[in-house]
Image (spheres, rainbow, N blue to C red):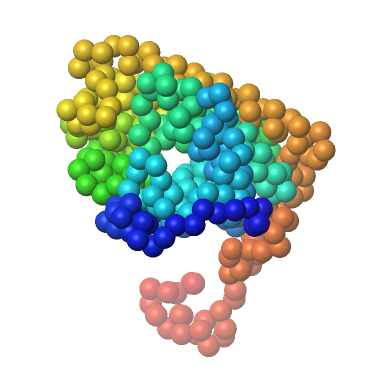
Amino acid sequence: MAALPMTAFAEGEVAAAVDTGDTTWIIVATVLVMFMFMPGLALFYGGLVSHRNILSTVMHSLSAFVIVTLVWVLWGYSFAFGPGIGGLFGGFEHVGFAGVGPEAKEGLTIPHLIFAIYQGMFAAITTALISGAVAERIRFSVWVIFSIFWVSLVYAPMAYWAWGGGWLSKLGGLDFAGGTVVHILSGVSALVAALVVGKRRTYPKQPTPPHNLVFFMIGGMCLWFGWFGFNAGSALASGGLASVAVATTQVAAAAGGVLWMAMEWILRKKATLVGGVTGVIAGLVAITPAAGFVSTLSAIAIGAIASVVCYWGLNVVKAKLRYDDSLDVFGIHGIGGIWGAIATGIFSSTKVNPAGVDGLLYGNPQQVLIQAADVLVAVALAAVGTFVILKVIGLFTPLRVTEEQETSGLDLSLHGENAYNTFPALSTEAPKPIAPSPAAQGALQSIPEMKGV
């Protein structure tokens, strides 16, 4: 693959085709998406699990990042953004990043190379999101194998269909930064993975409390910070459209956080940190497909409603169906992503983005039906693809750790490390009373109030 030909371009031709301002912004956006991934998602997930499993949870994010990056270069990008075969498959033209160089990508003012790397960040973080549903019981080797096949057979086809010129894009669906490609795929895949791998040994009788909510909060704020690169970077240029995406991202996140805390306050009499941060993430998930197509006021409505539907998903749907999605990936990304995709068809406006289409509120109800079709395709691909991949892997190796490994914790049993080496050994014995020394006893007896002690 290293010997595959790369197109050579004269320096003058590159300078004429590439806009340095746009390129600078996309480089920054790429780094922002990496930051929301590592350390953002790693801390966000790591803080929610037991202290015995934080390292294994972080390892899921780290391994997905490095593995998917290489898969993306070797074949994933070509499958997702190649010239295409019949609108179904991107093809092999860009295998090994062949033809992906410093020249401007067709139709854009940024180098093809930075576009490809930027899109690789999306592929990696989408894969890593799934790990939250099977945290604390999936075998690390299974996760590694699953990551390779999932990004190749589920993510790459959907990215091509929606973004790479495939058949879904020709239907007219709107997905600015990944409502279907990122959030619905990861959320539905997470639910299927949780069902196939099975529940944790103690679930639901002994729920695992989060071991470090400060880590969770820091991770959540890293996600919020990096999300500007995720959404505004999807404008693929600096300027007005990127500014719209920054504004809609910010207000949708704020609306989601405010409404979630308000619901907790009304229903449970206490607003929590976990709830506030979760509401913010719900708002961010929902605005992702709509970020460059809706106004700031519409973004507030999208974020607020996302908080309501995700709260319902976590506290009603999960409770009734009793599935063990460890970190509520489906409840936030699956349900929030579905709402965001449909909301894009409701609130989109050509006054915001002339390259888009008007939605239901602007006289085009058909767009909601197109968005619903995109949702159904993403749900079906994620569900079937994830089920088949895990079942095939399961033919060759167990999907989950042993009961002994799960009890002792995956950090030590799978990785030979402990995140914390300062915890004293736990004991079930009652502490023994310590008798005071004769001198201390005498001193106590000399105080009138202490007579008889």
Residue depicted at x 38% and y 73%: 449
Q: Is residue 100 visible?
A: yes
Image coordinates of residue 153 in percent, x first then y, are 63, 34
Say if 169 sits above or below 395 in the image: above
Looking at the picture, how far across and down is residue 261, in whole percent? 30, 38
Instruction: Pick whichever, 259 or 141, lies toward us.
Output: 141
At horizontal 76% and vertical 32% (from top left) the residue drawn is 392
Measured along the vertical axis of the image, is residue 168 above or below residue 133? Answer: above
Residue 178 lies in quadrant:
top left
Q: Nearer the viewer, residue 207 or 303?
A: 303
User: Eyeballing the image, is 131 above or below 222?
Assistant: above
Toward the bottom, the furthest residue is: 439
Task: Measuring from the top left, give residue 397's x and y in whole percent.
Answer: 80, 40
Counting the numbered discs, the total is: 0
In front: 66, or 254?
A: 66
Nearer to me, 76 or 111: 111
The residue at 44%/16% (across/down) is 373
Residue in view at x 63 percent, y 24 percent: 384
Camera sees residue 33: no
Q: Is residue 53 left or right of residue 20?
A: right
- Which residue reaches farthest right? 396
Q: Is residue 352 left or right of residue 235?
A: left
Question: In the image, residue 439 lies at what x, y percent?
Answer: 53, 88
Identify whether 342 is placed above or below 337. Answer: above
